[in-house]
């Protein structure tokens, strides 16, 4: 894999800045990811408590239903004894269903709150970083491709004449435009080097 396919500069100072920005973005994202996990765990505690209550209530409901069924076998008073037990079993099942709904709601709420807490801080940092990195990679890709052919080098030299400061252009030649028009190889190469360095590509 050549350096053209890497989204990093081949100039040491700029490469160091890019690596530092990657480190900062990574640390920032990790910190807020941990914050999101903490929020999720805190809300999930409610859901876990709900699951325990639901399990216990279902057990109680099953016990009451069994007791009611057994009470029906008591002579004379069986129906009178079993009805309250059966009603209590139904009430326990209703509570279990309500707790189940609470458990489901709390589980979704844990996810939504965790995402809501971490999304904005992460996006505020990651999106500009990603935009700058993609723009740099595109510029480096285009410049490297142009530098590989004589017409592309002429175009890079012209871009240097258009984009670089007059101070840098005069340092290349007293008449950089005229030298470019004449096709002076040394001037064109120096202009190409200016444009490549501006794109983050180290030139000997």
Image (cartoon, helix red, strand yellow):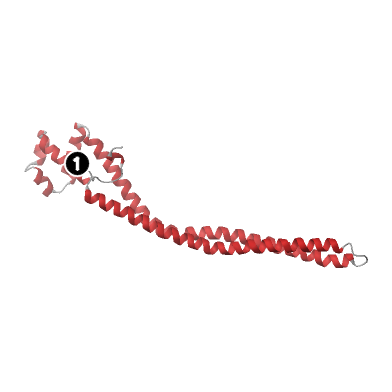
Query: Circle 1 sits in a helix, a strand or a loop, which is it?
Result: helix
Q: Residue at x 12, y 47 (%)?
A: 168
Q: Position of residue 12 (x, y in %)?
A: 22, 49
Q: Residue at x 65, y 60 (%)?
A: 100
Q: Position of residue 86 (x, y in %)?
A: 80, 63
Query: Quadrant where the C terminus lies?
Result: top left
User: In terms of image quadrants, where is residue 146?
Assistant: top left
Query: Quadrant where the N terminus lies?
Result: top left
- Is residue 163 found left or right of 66 in the rendered image? left
Above or below for 152 versus 111 = above
Of residue 44 and residue 153, the one placed in the foreground of this image is 44
Q: Position of residue 55 (x, y in %)?
A: 68, 61
Q: What residue would you read off at disc 1?
A: 159
Furthest residue to the right? 76
Q: Position of residue 124 (x, y in %)?
A: 38, 57
Furthest residue to the left? 174
């Amino acid at each position: 894999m050549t350096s053209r396919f890497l989204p990093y500069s081949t100039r040491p100072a700029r490469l160091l800045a890019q690596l530092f920005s990657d480190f900062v973005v990574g640390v920032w994202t990790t910190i807020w990811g941990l914050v999101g996990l903490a929020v999720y765990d805190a809300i999930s505690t409610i859901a876990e408590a709900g699951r325990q209550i639901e399990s216990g209530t279902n057990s109680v409901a099953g016990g009451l239903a069994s007791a009611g069924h057994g009470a029906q076998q008591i002579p004379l008073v069986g129906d009178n004894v079993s009805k309250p037990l059966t009603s209590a079993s139904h009430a326990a099942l209703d509570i279990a269903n309500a707790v189940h709904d609470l458990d489901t709601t709390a589980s979704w709420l844990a996810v939504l709150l965790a995402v809501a807490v971490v999304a904005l801080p992460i996006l505020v940092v990651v999106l500009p970083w990603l935009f700058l990195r993609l723009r740099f990679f595109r510029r480096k890709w285009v410049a490297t491709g142009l530098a590989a052919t004589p017409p592309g080098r002429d175009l890079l030299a012209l871009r240097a004449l258009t984009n670089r400061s007059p101070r840098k252009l005069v340092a290349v030649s007293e008449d950089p435009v005229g030298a470019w028009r004449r096709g002076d190889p040394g001037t064109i190469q120096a202009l190409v080097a200016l444009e490549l360095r501006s794109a983050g590509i180290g030139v000997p």
